[in-house]
Amino acid sequence: MIASEPLVVAVPKGRILGEARPLLAAAGIKPESAFDDPDSRALSFATALPSVRLIRVRSFDVATFVAFGAAHLGIAGNDVLMEFDYQEIYAPLDLRIGRCRLAVAEPKALSEADDPAQWSHIRIATKYPQVTRRHFARRGVQAECIKLNGALELAPTLGLCRRIVDLVSTGATLRANGLVEVERIAEVSARLIVNRAALKTRPRDILPFVERMREAVDANAA
Ligand code: PRP
């Protein structure tokens, strides 16, 4: 019999990863030392469990790797899941980390005279064009989205557009750029995600992992 390939778990670079590490460790996933070596160019890492490898990719790409089955599991915010709406992804567990919100923001001066109920057509800079269009279409507002991949808060200052849809956590980035939140689109937190086909073919590998993560989340919340 051929031994199963290792399970591949995709984790996002950036802020969520710091909060996810203790949960992964509690589930037995401790990556090799190269994972924490800033000089290493490695992207795929062995872990203390021979049956599990970690890959570290951009947050949006976690969903893509998992949706196409290139990774079996991953950690992704529901912001990313809402944007892609991949049917191949099952999200069984809220990890209760990476909490923030997806919100509409605009310059403070504009907000003082602005009435969102009067909007019929707006131009918005965002990493989330699908979510943004859907959100505004629901109330009959046409949102023309300009896709940016970061530093969105610069867009109003430099005249690219007057409004943005972005993640807000502490609000410090908005404040530093003279913007205020005018509408909330969704509460966000990180989820454990699973490729549906992999779950069907390898339930005995994947379900215990999901359960260990669930226990780690419960212990973290207690
Ligand atoms: C996110 C987001 C905002 C910022 C909000 O960016 O896009 O810019 O965090 O956080 P705050 O409300 O606590 O200031 P991130 O730092 O993740 O980097 P990115 O712009 O590269 O996505």
Image (cartoon, rainbow, N blue to C red):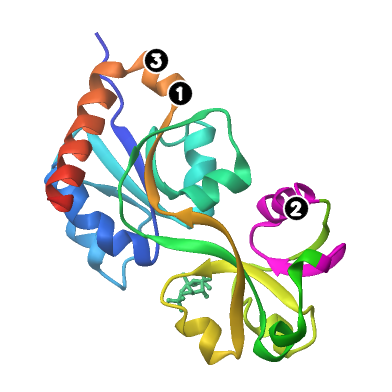
Between the C-alphas of marks 2 and 3, the distance is: 34 Å
- Secondary structure at numbered mark 1: helix
* Residue name at image x 70 percent, y 56 percent: 132
Q: Nearer the viewer, residue 45 or 213?
A: 213
Report how many numbered discs are placed on residues in the image: 3
**Where is 219 relative to 175, above or below?**
above
Which amino acid type is marked by label 2?
Answer: Arg
* Residue name at image x 43 percent, y 48 percent: 76
Nearer-N-terminus badge (1/2): 2
Residue corresponding to mark 1 = 196
Tell me if residue 16 is in the magenta stretch. no
Between marks 1 and 2 in the image, the one whose residue lies nearer the viewer? 2
Instruction: Point out the image quarter for the N terminus.
Output: top left
* Residue name at image x 68 percent, y 68 percent: 148
Which amino acid type is marked by label 3?
Answer: Lys
Tell me if residue 130 is in the magenta stretch. yes
Q: Which residues are magenta?
A: 118-139
Residue that lies at the very extreme toward the right in this rendered image: 121
User: Residue 4's spot in the image, x, y percent?
Assistant: 28, 21
Between marks 2 and 3 in the image, the one whose residue lies nearer the viewer? 2
Residue corresponding to mark 3 = 200
* Ligand 1 lies under 8 Å from the Cβ of mark 2: no
User: Residue 201's spot in the image, x, y percent?
Assistant: 38, 14
Q: Which mark is residue 158?
A: none
**Where is 202 relative to 218, above or below?**
above
Between the C-alphas of marks 3 and 1, the distance is: 6 Å
Task: Judge from the rendering whether residue 56 lies leftward or rightward of residue 187; answer left or right.
Answer: left
